[in-house]
Structures are given as structure tokens and as C-alpha cells.
Image (cartoon, rainbow, N blue to C red):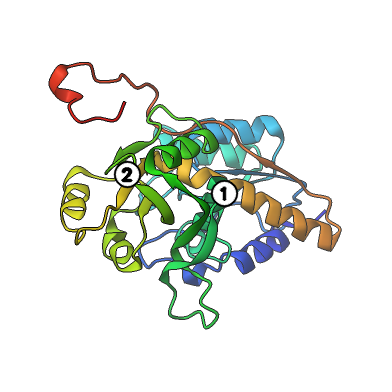
Amino acid sequence: MPRLSEVIAELEKLWPAERAESWDAVGTVVGDPGQEVSRVLFAVDPVQEIADEAVELGADLLVTHHPLYLRGTTTVAASTFKGRVVHTLIKNDVALHVAHTNADTADPGVSDALAGALDVRVVRPLVPDPADPAGRRGLGRVCELDHPLTVRELAARAAERLPATAQGIRVAGDPEALVRTLAVSGGSGDSLFDHVRAAGVDAFLTADLRHHPASEFLADRAGRPLALLDAAHWATEWPWCEQAAAQLDQISDRHGWGLRVHVSTTVTDPWTAHAASTHPTSTAGAPN
């Protein structure tokens, strides 16, 4: 069996820490470099439910997309919820490694996995990495559909193929407009509106769209019938876990490690229920 340090070295080749944003907190959070690794679990969030799942599974390594400590802390006391995660992992010899913005911009990265889940063809990064001479890395992806879909049909495809959440898929724009080109970005995407506008796509699928940025973007689209599709943050990033697990499987096979690699299906999206609006004024203009 490989040592943790050997597995981490391979993960760092996939998602080098130096490619993370300066504000990010990636890399190994807990774990003994010399410990042996035989089972690995991938998940989006390093929350207590996932730590407990890793322990129950018998995992030696938990790899998550979101950091445990994005900002500094002065305590890992078990009286805090993040401290409880740390205590659970250490007591059970489970290492934790994080790949966040360095996985977002990787080739393949988080948005490649999202595009794959939607069955659309990646053309190029939405925001290319200037340090990548091949032009493959970067934030978000510009994609093409094999056959045009209406916005309504595309939303239905996203709702069918992304993990189910209470939110589902929200749509802004004409539900009957045709979509031939699509920008996607896993996670929060309204900071990318200028890049989406410049890309000249028909629609943008991402998460965490806020009222004012979305409203202003739709009002300033130079007459283009561009639509917005807003999915749950967790749902847009979960496909990366499957992609990353497949990458580690290939590495394990190449080295003859025999790692057992798993993907958590535990829904850690914070929203747990949805009630459709029924007030007459709240449904005016909404698609049927």
C-alpha cells in the first residue's frame, strides 16, 4: 500500500497548490505522511456527516473540494463544529486533503465535470489561465450543444442529470429561447458575468446567483436573448468528485497500488426543502 505522502504527491500533480487563489486554503489539513492508504473517499464538503462517513467506510484519506478552514482559526477544540471534524479524523487515522480553486482551473477541472454531467461539449475555458500555453486550463468552460435545446429543455436536462437538491434549477430569461452555446461554472458564478457576456453564449449555468447582479446582467445584454440557469452550489461541484475519483483510480492502477476509491453520495447542500410560490403576484410571468 502507498504512504499518504505518495498519494498526496500524485494529487498535487493533478491540482498543484500554487495554482490556487491567494485567498484559498488548499492542501493537506490533517494526516501523517507516513501512514498507509488503502481506501479514499471523495466529497464536496468536509462537514461532520462526511467525516463520520469516512470513518464508517474505513477510509484512510478524505479528499474534499471545499476547505475546512478557509480563514484562520485559533482553536480546533471539539466544542466547535470544525474542531469536531478535526478530532474525528485524527482519532480514526483519516487524513484530509483539499483541492479547491486549484481544481476549479485544472485540466480537467470542476467545470469540465459539470459540462460532462450535462452532456455538452467543452470548447475552451471561459476565463483562460494566462500561464497555460495550451489554453486548456482556466475558470469555467464555454460549451456547445450537439443539438439546440430551449432554455426550458436545458433546465430540465440539468435537473435530471445533476444531483437532486431542494432548490432544483432556477431560470432567468425566455424559457423558449434556443440554446446552442452554453457557459458553465461550478460553484458561485456571478463574478464571471463580464466574461460570459464577452463569450457570446446563449446561456450561462452556474450557482449562487444573486438578485441584483443577475437582474443587472439581464438588463445589460445588448439585445441578446441570454438566459441564466441557477443550480445549487453543491450540485454543480459534486460531478467533480466522480471525475477526481476516476483520475485517482487511473493513478492507482498505473502504480499497482490497489486503492479502493469511493465517492460520497451524501447530500451536503444546506437547503433541505422547497415550497413553490402560490401568491398570485409571485407567479406572474413565471414559466408553466
Q: Is residue 161 above or below residue 226?
A: above
In this picture, residue 38 sits left or right of residue 179: right
Please name whichever residue, 152 or 246, is drawn nearer the observer in this view of the structure: 152
Q: Position of residue 135 (x, y in %)?
A: 51, 77
Residue type indicated by callout 1: Asp
Q: Position of residue 226 (x, y in %)?
A: 29, 53
Residue 264, quarter of picture: top right
Which residue is drawn at the image coordinates 34% and 40% (left, top)?
A: 176
Element at label 1: loop
In three-dimensional space, the C-alpha distance between marks 2 and 1, rounded to whole angstroms, equals 22 Å
Q: Residue most toward the right? A: 256
Q: Position of residue 55 (x, y in %)?
A: 65, 33
Residue 273, quarter of picture: top left
Which residue is drawn at the image coordinates 30% and 68% (left, top)?
A: 198
User: Earlier along the polypeptide chain: callout 2 or callout 1?
Assistant: 1
How many residues crowd around disc 2 within 10 Å: few (fewer than 14), some, or many (20 or more)? some
In this picture, residue 243 sits left or right of residue 64: right
Which residue is drawn at the image coordinates 70% and 33% (left, top)?
A: 57
Which residue is drawn at the image coordinates 63% and 53% (left, top)?
A: 244
Q: Which mark is residue 77?
A: none
The residue identified by callout 1 is: 119
Q: Position of residue 48 (x, y in %)?
A: 50, 33
Q: Residue most toward the left? A: 281
Element at label 2: loop
The residue identified by callout 2 is: 208
